[in-house]
Amino acid sequence: MKLICIGRNYTAHIEELANERPEEPVVFIKPDSAILPKEQDFYIPEFSNDVHYEVEVLVKIKKVGKHINEQFAHNYYDEIGLGIDFTARDLQAKLKEKGLPWEKAKGFDGAAVVGNWVHKSNFKDLNELNFSLIKNGKEVQKSNTSLMLWRIDELISYISMFFTLKKGDIIFTGTPSGVGRIVANDYLTGVLEGQTIFTVKIK
């Protein structure tokens, strides 16, 4: 099982980090060891002083696929979720400055929160999903999947050109604007279409 992540998929987030708008999806992978175990607190790693939250809509792949045509991509998943792509922003900046891979800043232990899964039939339109992240009772990220540069089925088709998708793989579809730093004792709640999908305590 692998975690396939999409970077720079919301224009406002691209702008807030002063990144260049990509011509095609930015793809990177987190190892499965990055998944934060259920009911476990997130501990800020010693190697970073600037870990950021990034809330994202998730998709769980249900069967093997390669070179998937976009019009058939909906057949490869049933479940939608919400999670966090924790990012050691200070470490990432150093790596990007040197032209090095991001994995140490994105794929460390616990860097991937995977919330509860909801069957896609519970949603009217996957391209119109409202989601948000609440930090200590205050909404810090809020968006809708209609604002994605590349939507779910487009992403599945694109990713499958390079990587065989397997049952249980999880796609992180990108974060909107509003990312920010976490500190000890923060409490994060992820909400998808009015439903609480995850909660995380920061230590």
Image (tube, rainbow, N blue to C red):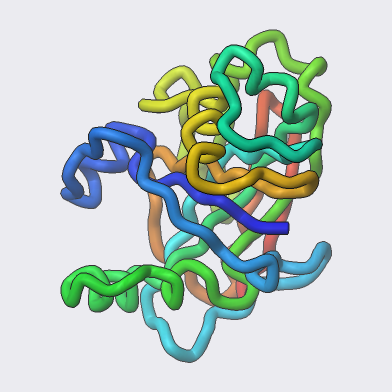
Residue 124 seen by the camera? yes
- Residue 140 seen in this snapshot: no
Residue at coordinates 63% horizontally, 69% vertically from top-left?
34
Would you place residue 163 above or below residue 184 in this image?
Answer: above
Image: 31 above or below 82 = below
Q: Residue at x 36, y 26 (%)?
A: 149
Q: Identify which residue is drawn at 81% across, 16% down.
A: 121
Residue 159 drawn at (x, y percent): 51, 40
Quadrant location of the C terminus in the rendered image: bottom right
Pick the quarter of the image with the N terminus.
Answer: bottom right
The number of numbered discs placed on residues in the rendered structure image is: 0
Task: Give residue 115's position: percent from left, percent from top.
Answer: 74, 48
Q: Which residue in the rendered view is the most extreme toward the front?
A: 67
Above or below: residue 19 compared with residue 152: below
Residue farthest to the bottom, as pictured:
46
Would residue 183 be found to the left or right of residue 66 on screen?
left
Residue 32: which quarter of the image? Answer: bottom right
Compared to 74, does 187 lie above or below? below
Residue 124: x percent and y percent?
A: 70, 9
Say which of 140 and 121 sits in front: 121
| Between 164 and 196, the one nearer to me in the picture | 164
State the residue at coordinates (17%, 72%): 97
Residue closer to the observer: 18 or 8: 8
Residue 189 picture location, percent across and down:
65, 49
**Depth order, front residue of 125/29:** 29
**Picture quarter containing residue 202?**
bottom right
